[in-house]
Image: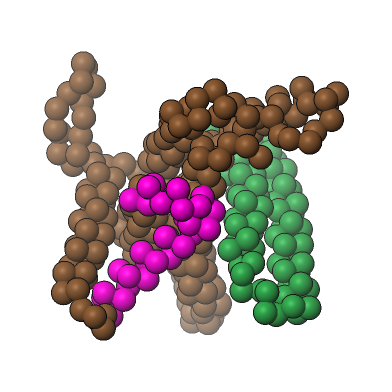
Amino acid sequence: MTIDPIHQFQIQNFVPLFSIGRHQIYFTNSALFMLIIVLLVSALLIGATAPRAMVPGRLQSVAEMSYEFVANMLRSSAGTEGMRFFPFVFSLFMFVLVANMIGLIPYSFTVTSQLIITASLALLVFVIVVGYGFWRNGLHFLNLFVPKGVPIYILPAIVVIEILSFLSRPISHSVRLFANMLAGHITLQVFAGFIIMLAGFGILGWFGAALPLILVIMLTALEFLVAFLQAYVFAILTCIYLNDAIHPGH
Amino acid sequence: MDPTAAKYIGAGIACIGMGGAGAGVGIIFGSYLAAALRNPSAAQGQFGNLIFGFAVTEALGIFSLLIALLLLFGL
């Protein structure tokens, strides 16, 4: 019996939409799940805050808590001026969080386990940081690469390192989320495969299969933690990068 | 050497990098716990930093796991 842990990440083409040049564009399972995520987040936030009760109910509390959570995160890392980016950071956080959570439902599709999706999000952040940094600070934005209080003879090396680390940000930003999701789902799949393999050995195997079953349950709990954590990390890194665009001096 | 064998050996070697990430994550949580026990009232305020440091360190281990997975399934 062979396990194919990569199969779950396959893109399936559902409906052909249109073609660009000779390339056919399809409505894929990835697009379907992104649509579901956006609808779910919108329904949650619009529906929950519609009553505008003084004493919030459960759903309204969820909406208010997530709002407060992201607002505090952004305010503490990018200052009050960073709050103009609140809608952007909040949508990013909710999208990634719900995408990660939906991906943990069996037989569903994890949008954030596709590198192209996370890379698009990370590049969007990168472009906004560079664009806003230059628009707001002009050439002073380049101060970001010249830390203060560094001896002049090692400054050239520091500047090169700073530029390289700035340019590698979108890579690490996107690969972190993508690889975490990919590795987590593959681990779950491999351990679930152990259950099937052991159960194939008859009665004795059934008892043996209980061990990986417990492990899979614990791993699923861990994956829920990771799903939240990676959404949080994605959002807080966005806040930190935005802070660089707003206050480029070190 | 048989290319398939080399691939599997490479995947195994790539996973060594995860040991470093393991040590790093251990240092982060150990230091946090040590500091939190000294001054429990300040511990809550540093939780965000803890998670941030954990995620940044853990990502490096994930990168080497990614290389191993690419060797096994991708290439």
Q: Is residue A190 above or below residue B3?
A: below
Magenta residues, start to end: A58-87
Q: Would residue A202 be found to the left or right of residue B34 on screen? A: left
Q: Position of residue A99 (x, y in %)?
A: 35, 55
Which residue is at a point 73% across and 35% down the rendered structure image? A148
Q: In this view of the protein, which residue sits in the foreground, B40 or A231?
A: B40
The answer to whether A249 is drawn above or below residue A203 in the figure is: above
Q: Is residue B54 above or below residue A160?
A: below
- Residue A79 among magenta residues: yes
Assign the magenta stretch its main secondary structure.
helix
**x, y percentage for residue B66?**
57, 44
Which of A230 and A25 lies nearest the eye of the viewer?
A: A230
**Is A241 displayed left or right of A90 in the figure?**
right
Q: Which residue appears at 23% of the width and 66% of the height?
A: A44
Write down which chain is painted brown. Answer: A
Whether residue A179 is visible: no
Which x, y percent locates residue A140?
A: 57, 27
In the picture, the quarter occupied by the C terminus of chain A is: top right
The verdict on residue A40 being magenta is: no
Q: Which residue is pictured at 62% across the width and 51% down the height?
A: B56
Q: Name chain B's colour.
A: green
Q: x, y (%) of residue B52?
A: 60, 57
A166 vs A216, nearest the viewer: A166
